[in-house]
Amino acid sequence: FSAWWNWLYGNSLGMRPMVDFYSIFLLVIGLFLNRIKISWLRGVIAIFIFLSVFLNLFQTWQYERGILHYDSMNRRAYWYIFLKTADKYIGAISDQEEYYYGKLADVPFTGTVYNVGEDIPVGWTNFKDFISTDPERPKIALDENVIYSPTYAYWIHDSLIGMQNLYIDFSANYAEEDKNAALGALFVVDISDQAGKLLFYKTFRLKRLPDDVIREWREGSIGFKLPEITQKMHHIKLYVWNDGKQTIYLDRMAIKFLTYDH
């Protein structure tokens, strides 16, 4: 069942191919219960089966509501939404790195790092006017007035035309002034033509799960696939958009362009 590269079989709860074998599993469980002669043990097993069925149905309901994410669950996310029903948990779990078929290259073919307080690398917008003068750690302050981070623009080389296996790793260090202020902040990638017309646009949350941590530096990251590069595509822009307009800080942004076998 799990030999396929997309082991979770797309956006679903559970593995669809197993449905064909439910009747066989049911016969095995029935034979197992029939062989047990100790009444209290049969009772314990029956309760366990009932609770398992309840949990399955409950998580199906969470999945339909958007509480249980279709492909980005991990241990921390699972226990965060375990048996939760409130509306505030709908959409609380954000996307993880996008899946790809093959092996990701060990070394990027290009990349860039924006360290606040250092010389601005080629391709980044000048953002000095919005940098905090905090002597301990220079940082970019995003709030209701400044909602965009420095932007990196990559001009697409002719050698990339036709490629369908490009992958970007985008990370940023962030800190929050208030609880979960970064939940409204997004990693953004957009691709435009030479005239500036948007051809591709995608966003990912900077912070994946709510918590109570404030004024502590952490790294947010995302990995995602680019669409097939066409002749019309002229440049790729990457930045952080503070769509929530709450106060957050950034002090390092790193971008890697990689390829993967497919």
Image: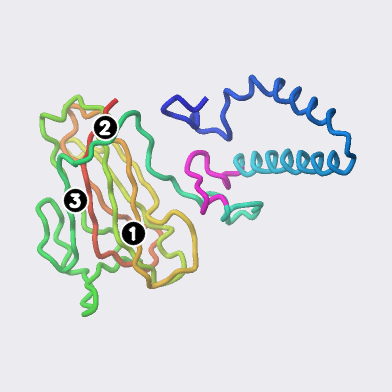
Please tell me which residue lies in front, 41 or 233: 41
- For disc 2, the marked residue is 260
- How packed is label 1: few (under 14 Cα within 10 Å), some, or many (20 or more)? some
Left or right: residue 37 versus residue 80 is right
- Rounded to the nearest whole Å, what is the CA distance between mark 3 and mark 2? 22 Å
Image quadrant holding the C terminus, namely: top left
SS category of the residue bearing label 3? strand
Where 19 falls versus 242 (above or below)? Answer: above
Which amino acid does the dot numbered 2 rest on?
Tyr
Badge number at residue 219 = 1
Q: Quadrant of residue 185?
A: bottom left
- Rounded to the nearest whole Å, what is the CA distance between mark 3 and mark 1? 18 Å
Q: Which comes sooner in the sequence, label 1 or label 2?
A: 1
- For disc 3, the marked residue is 152
Left or right: residue 27 versus residue 180 is right
Q: Which comes sooner in the sequence, label 3 or label 2?
A: 3
